Image (cartoon, helix red, strand yellow):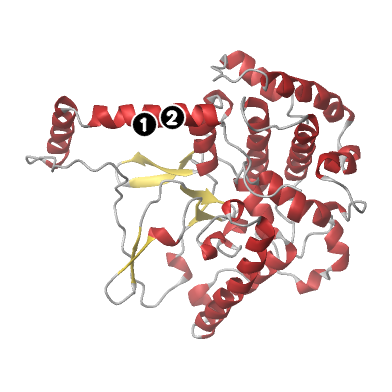
């Protein structure tokens, strides 16, 4: 069974490290530093001097918000899925494609061609549209990562079959309803009474602020251990409300796919900590009037508890992270979607248990990509993709 993170393209990763070191040297040149000082002086209208030693790192504006009598009006909601851009002076709106951590890693660590990403000004009106784009990025990972992703023909078949199934479910609007009271399609829905589950957020919004890389390290405390600020918003965008209804992935600090000794140990440990988190949430909710903390029909703690119990947590995790997708899909989602696989199935035969779910066209396209990936594995290199060829190769695997 898949256990943990799949490999990035290590050849591209090494080159990225070399480029980063070269960029640091460039940034320390006196001529470059004078340009930075000149830019700051122009923006702020007063002399600026870089302070030595020059420390390379991320610097972010801190936004402090204190709310005494919290009203639903202060909870940010958005009419579309996408990134906030300044359109005119002092006006920000959702006007660009979401800048996700996963897409950034696709470019930075695997050299996947930028031309197959959504257009920079693309936004989305429904959660289903965005789930479909996320699923298509998993297909792109398989198509364009030249090195280190595929270990055998059967490994490639597993990855191909699971990605096509996941995309189909997204296009059919089934991923967005999974694990909610409106889930009537999954195998597990026959074992759970719909009235025991909470309703699904509207497919057409409003949408909520979501940070792909938000974790405990983004929270700054003051001397009294009170939250002073949240920092590092670079992968934040207006996303499906489903994402914020999951419990935080970072309760154990380490990601599931990087946990030692294995994924199952992460699941058990996380579950034990989740009870503490939910207990604290329930205590906070009980001390407040409902409109003060929640614009959903049931408490957020209930949504989070159900997310873990139904597997919605793993669906969201799989949707957002291409290199964790295989472990999440085959361990926690496949049988919830389609029922038990036959007993004793080995890792290399997983694809055989679900190949019948693919269309004729999807099945026909599977073997050519298997052979292509096997051929690619014979030559380690960094591929510079022709834009026309890349778009065609990608579109050939996006079936309607």
Q: Label 1 crowding class (10 Å Cα cut-off): few <14, some 14-19, many 20+?
A: few
Residue 351, image quadrant = top right
Q: Position of residue 60 (x, y in %)?
A: 31, 50
Q: Residue at x 83, y 54 (%)?
A: 335
Q: Position of residue 210 (x, y in %)?
A: 51, 54
Q: Residue at x 85, y 46 (%)?
A: 346
Q: Position of residue 357 (x, y in %)?
A: 88, 40
Q: Is residue 285 visible?
A: yes
Report the Cα–Cα distance between label 1 and label 2.
6 Å
Q: Position of residue 204 (x, y in %)?
A: 63, 51
Which residue has dot 2 on it? 16
Q: Nearer the viewer, residue 143 or 290?
A: 143
Give the number of the disc on residue 188. Answer: none
Q: Nearer the viewer, residue 236 or 153?
A: 153
Residue 306, image quadrant = bottom right
Q: Nearer the viewer, residue 212 or 249?
A: 249
Which residue has dot 1 on it? 20
Do labels 1 and 2 touch, CB within 8 Å? yes
Q: Secondary structure at mark 2?
A: helix
């Amino acid at each position: 069974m898949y256990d943990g993170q799949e490999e990035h393209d290590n050849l591209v990763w090494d080159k990225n490290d070399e480029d980063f070191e070269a960029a640091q040297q460039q940034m320390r040149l006196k001529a470059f530093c004078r340009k930075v000082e000149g830019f700051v002086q122009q923006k702020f209208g007063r002399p600026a001097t870089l302070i030595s030693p020059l420390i390379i790192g991320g610097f972010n504006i801190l936004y402090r918000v204190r709310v005494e009598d919290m009203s639903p009006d202060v909870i940010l909601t958005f009419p579309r899925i996408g990134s906030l851009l300044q359109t005119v002076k002092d006006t920000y709106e959702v006007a660009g494609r979401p800048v996700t951590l996963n897409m950034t890693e696709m470019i930075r660590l695997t050299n996947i061609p930028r031309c197959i990403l959504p257009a920079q000004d693309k936004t989305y009106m429904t959660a289903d549209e965005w789930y479909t784009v996320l699923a298509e990025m998993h297909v792109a990972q398989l198509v364009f990562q030249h090195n280190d992703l595929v270990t055998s023909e059967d490994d490639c078949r597993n990855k191909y079959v699971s990605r096509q199934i996941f995309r189909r479910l997204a296009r059919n609007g089934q991923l967005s309803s999974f694990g909610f009271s409106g889930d009537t399609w999954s195998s597990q829905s026959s074992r759970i009474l719909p009235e025991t589950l909470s309703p699904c957020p509207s497919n057409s919004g409003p949408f909520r602020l979501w940070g792909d890389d938000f974790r405990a390290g983004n929270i700054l405390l003051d001397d009294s251990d009170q939250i002073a600020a949240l920092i590092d918003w670079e992968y934040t965008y207006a996303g499906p409300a489903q994402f914020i209804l999951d419990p935080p992935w970072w309760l154990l600090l380490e990601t599931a796919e990087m946990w030692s000794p294995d994924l199952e140990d992460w699941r058990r440990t996380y579950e034990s900590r989740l009870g503490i988190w939910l207990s604290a949430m329930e205590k906070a909710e009980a001390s407040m009037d409902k409109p003060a903390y929640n614009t959903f029909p049931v408490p957020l703690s209930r949504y989070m508890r159900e997310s873990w119990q139904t597997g919605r947590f793993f669906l969201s995790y799989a949707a957002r992270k291409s290199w964790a997708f295989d472990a999440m899909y085959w361990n926690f989602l496949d049988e919830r979607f389609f029922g038990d696989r036959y007993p004793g199935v080995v890792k290399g035969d997983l694809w055989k248990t679900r190949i019948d779910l693919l269309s004729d066209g999807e099945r026909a396209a599977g073997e050519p990509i298997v052979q292509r990936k096997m051929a690619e594995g014979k030559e380690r290199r960094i591929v510079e993709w022709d834009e026309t060829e890349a778009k065609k190769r990608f579109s050939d695997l996006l079936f309607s």
